[in-house]
Image (cartoon, coloured by chain):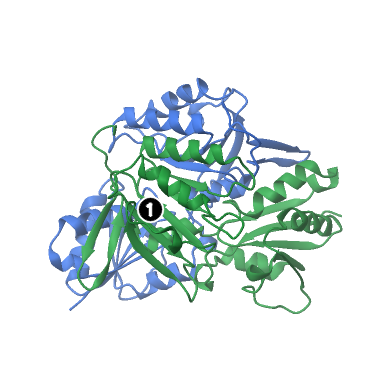
Chain colours: A blue, B green
Amino acid sequence: MSGHLAVVGLGPGDARYLTPEADGALAAAEALYGYGSYLDRVPVRAGQRRHGSDNREERARAIAALRDAAAGTRVAVVSGGDPGVFAMAAAVCEEIEAGPDSWRALDIAIVPGITAMLAVAARIGAPLGHDFCALSLSDNLKPWGLVEQRIDAAASAGFVMALYNPISRARPWQFGAAIERLRRRLPGTTPVVFGHAVGRPDEHVSVTTLAAADTADADMATLIIVGSRETRVVQRSGRAPLVYTPRAVAEVSA
Amino acid sequence: MSGHLAVVGLGPGDARYLTPEADGALAAAEALYGYGSYLDRVPVRAGQRRHGSDNREERARAIAALRDAAAGTRVAVVSGGDPGVFAMAAAVCEEIEAGPDSWRALDIAIVPGITAMLAVAARIGAPLGHDFCALSLSDNLKPWGLVEQRIDAAASAGFVMALYNPISRARPWQFGAAIERLRRRLPGTTPVVFGHAVGRPDEHVSVTTLAAADTADADMATLIIVGSRETRVVQRSGRAPLVYTPRAVAEVSA
């Protein structure tokens, strides 16, 4: 008996972003595992078990899903955005490495999705149009010193930055500290995009500058894009501005 | 008269990755613009004009599409992967900024797609499961010194790297130079993933190490992921290995 486990990316909220491959993987599953809010986005299908759990229980969820798959069930673990970007795919791989041999025998499929930075960038233009990085501001699983080192490296080398997990009730100061650090390394005029709940009914996207960025505008559902020295804002009368990073860079920045 | 221009991400090749939003934008268009190979992926629809062009003519394509939209046409510019990642969205924004006021009045929509690094990562596990960067190795639009600076910064700070545009007939040595540079900064055992044409019939994904990486295995259709010091390979008998980067980092790397 060889079970099957798919880790499925739902994309950013709305079904318009769910790929046919992801839709097919969800329809084929006998059991669904996921954070309750993500499971709620998946249509209920007869005969399909649903195992919701809290957002922070990634490890327990991965283990429960792998056990179920090893027992012969066709399992789908649902993930917001893309499962490979600060989401469930790494958690599942970690447990496969640590777990029994039978888990390595499973048929594992990772089904990609539109991750938040791509959705936010699309809403506002093309801020990720040149070299960029994706950085989680959560220090639950890494030391804050490493976040600082990466912020410095990315700013100095001219990478645009997509900041995931900026803030939560348990991590209230980290985003402010990151913005302060960026202000010491990049011009105050650097464009900053706040993308809240993109693809959902309460979507809100705003453009500001590094000098004016208000950390109170970010919550758990916000993805922030911090431009590079090259990133530009195109004002348009009667329309939202376009923010983009040009494809060309003339010379090495300081 | 206010025209409409959508820049639409097709994702990596196969229609299973085309989102419903992208499919809808393609169906609604009166004129399609794009690189010929991407246009070939879009079903032919009656009454829809198609304007194919060469891969390198991004600027001319953006201008032609904007002119058409400003004349009142509903235009879709098609892009492989995600249009905001080393693709057409930035080219369109650049021309809007440089062009006549009427182009700023256009209704512009960027429709996100699955970019190559997400598709390649999904095929092999979760190599982008921790902080990462996306870097184009093309020095057509930036000095090679800047690519080197970014490679150094990303390697030193522990970012996993997704390398786009590794090689072409006109840029034969850059990927080799990048690998040589990485070998001086990361252990030879660092996992490296070559993802060729993911989502297409000639798809091929392989795993090697930085020491063993053969630059002859990359072509224009290859996306390379270079792991960090944390990235792990899980061998599985009878199955391809899983490559993943753990969510946790214990301490700041040297």
* Residue A165 in view here: yes
Residue at screen point 47% across, 47% down = B177
Q: Amino acid at mark 1?
A: Ser
Image side of residue B67 versus residue A128, left or right: right
Q: Is residue B20 above or below residue B62?
A: below
Q: Nearer the viewer, residue A128 or A9?
A: A128
Residue at screen point 70% across, 41% down = A240
Image side of residue A224 versus residue B206, left or right: right
Place residue A75 in its image quadrant.
bottom left
Image side of residue A244 versus residue B167, left or right: right
* Residue A113 in view here: no
The residue indicated by pointer 1 is: A37
Q: Nearer the viewer, residue B197 or A9?
A: B197
Disc 1 packing (10 Å; few <14; some 14–19; many ≥20): some
* x and y, in percent, of residue B253 in the image: 29, 34
Location of the N terminus of chain A (image quadrant): bottom left
Q: Nearer the viewer, residue A213 or B164?
A: B164
* x and y, in percent, of residue A231 in the image: 63, 36
Residue at screen point 53% across, 57% down = B167
Residue at screen point 54% across, 51% down = A119
Instruction: Farthest residue to the left: give it.
Output: A100
Place residue A166 in its image quadrant.
top left
Q: Pointer 1 indicates a residue of which chain?
A: A
* x and y, in percent, of residue B53 in the image: 73, 65
Q: Is residue A231 above or below residue A254?
A: below
Location of the C terminus of chain A (image quadrant): top right
What SS does tag 1 mark?
Answer: helix
